[in-house]
Image (cartoon, rainbow, N blue to C red):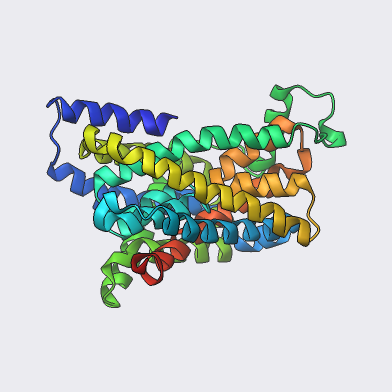
């Protein structure tokens, strides 16, 4: 993926001496740019719409999140990640956030837990490799599932157009410079308020979770103001995340990454394997069909983008919007849940 390529290029450049391992700009990226990306990805986090339009898929997604948490506990018990030292439980919590929400939750959790750059890079590299195989396996499990009647006989290009229309039907111009500027300004306000609240309560490490809480509240209370900013905000957030990952890669060691990546890959394999097993077990127990189980698992492990891509590829026209919304819900809750999981459970294992 583009994210892992960014990390690897920065890792290579720093290890051959072209760019430094440590520089003040890396601290600036962590302290100011990374929090800015969180609101930009959550302007569409209207929980009222999530609960209203996702139907049973949200319940299955929640069961999948439980599977991820239990998978994390099992994986850390079997593979303690001692080679990462004090970063072991932090990366376990971050990977749990990654497999409930998405990449933004992974980087937000590592930032909230003050995780070293080398460990962050190793964890993301292992996870990207695992996810490539996992998504292929999900498509294999869905090979006999039929498309919706609305999706039959339509080309992939036409289905992609329908998916885009579903998300942007309220906006004449989904991306423009005025919306970019407004999105960045609004995100800056949320970040300033969240940081001030964290300082006021004496919990500076929780600034990103508090920022997440604020933007989710306002996106739910005032969706007409914030939802139009979502397309532009997501584009800017993608750039910011890649800048952050470049700073992470630059501060890492190739030797350390190669030493830790195999253990982290095995950790991710156990974590996601337990997640999928519990998805099928709980899904069948509560009467979910295979389509909902696979789509919810995809949204858990990959986020809204990969879930929608699966729905488009399979011609599941009625699932385009629910898949996007449950993935966005994962963005809203994963950092909270997994920072708490890390502090209260994983660090004692």
Q: Is residue 78 visible?
A: yes
Looking at the image, residue 166 sits to the left or right of residue 266; the answer is right
Q: Residue furthest front?
A: 78
The image quarter containing residue 178 is: top left
> For the point 81% across and 34% down, which residue is it?
147
Looking at the image, residue 279 sits to the left or right of residue 286; the answer is left
Q: Position of residue 260 (x, y in %)?
A: 31, 41
> For the point 37% across and 43% down, which residue is it?
263
Using the image as rendered, state which of residue 209 and residue 173 is in the foreground.
209
Q: Position of residue 5 (x, y in %)?
A: 36, 28
Compared with residue 117, is residue 86 higher up or lower down, i.e. above or below? below
> For the point 76% across and 38% down, which residue is it?
316
Quadrant assignment for the N terminus: top left
Looking at the image, residue 122 sits to the left or right of residue 142; the answer is left
Using the image as rendered, state which of residue 301 and residue 33 is in the foreground.
301
Q: Position of residue 55 (x, y in %)?
A: 75, 57
Compared with residue 104, is residue 133 higher up or lower down, i.e. above or below? above
Q: Residue furthest bottom?
A: 201
**How many numbered marks are there?**
0
Compared with residue 271, is residue 128 higher up or lower down, i.e. above or below? above
Q: Position of residue 119 (x, y in %)?
A: 29, 46
Using the image as rendered, state which of residue 154 and residue 114 is in the foreground.
114
Q: Is residue 55 visible?
A: no
């Amino acid at each position: 993926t583009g994210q892992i390529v960014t990390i690897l290029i920065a890792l290579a450049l720093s290890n051959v001496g072209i760019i430094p391992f440590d520089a003040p700009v890396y601290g600036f990226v962590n302290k100011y740019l990374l929090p800015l990306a969180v609101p930009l990805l959550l302007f569409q986090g209207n929980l009222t719409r999530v609960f209203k339009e996702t139907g049973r898929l949200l319940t299955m997604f929640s069961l999948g999140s439980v599977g991820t948490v239990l998978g994390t506990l099992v994986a850390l018990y079997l593979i303690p990640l001692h080679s990462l030292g004090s970063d072991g439980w932090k990366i376990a919590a971050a990977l749990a956030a990654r497999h409930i929400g998405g990449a933004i939750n992974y980087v937000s959790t590592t930032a909230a837990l003050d995780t070293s750059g080398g460990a962050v890079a190793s964890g993301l590299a292992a996870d990207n490799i695992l996810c490539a195989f996992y998504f292929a396996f999900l498509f294999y499990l869905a090979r006999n599932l039929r498309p919706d009647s609305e999706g039959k006989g339509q080309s992939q290009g036409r289905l992609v157009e329908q998916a885009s229309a579903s998300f942007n039907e309220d906006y004449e111009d989904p991306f423009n410079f005025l919306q970019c500027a407004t999105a960045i300004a609004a995100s800056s306000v949320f970040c300033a308020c969240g940081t001030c609240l964290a300082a006021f309560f004496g919990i500076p490490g929780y600034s990103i979770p508090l920022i997440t809480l604020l933007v989710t509240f306002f996106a739910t209370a005032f969706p007409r103001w914030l939802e139009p900013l979502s397309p532009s905000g997501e584009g800017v957030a993608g750039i910011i995340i890649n800048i952050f990952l470049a700073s992470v890669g630059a501060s890492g060691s190739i030797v350390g990454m190669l030493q830790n990546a195999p253990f982290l890959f095995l950790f991710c394999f156990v974590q996601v394997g337990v997640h999928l097993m519990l998805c099928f077990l709980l899904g069948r127990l509560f009467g979910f069909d295979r389509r909902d189980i696979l789509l919810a698992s995809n949204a858990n492990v990959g986020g809204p983008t990969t879930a929608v891509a699966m729905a488009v590829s399979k011609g599941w026209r009625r699932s385009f919007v629910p898949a996007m919304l449950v993935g966005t819900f994962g963005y809203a809750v994963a950092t909270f849940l997994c920072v708490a999981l890390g502090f209260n459970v994983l660090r004692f294992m």
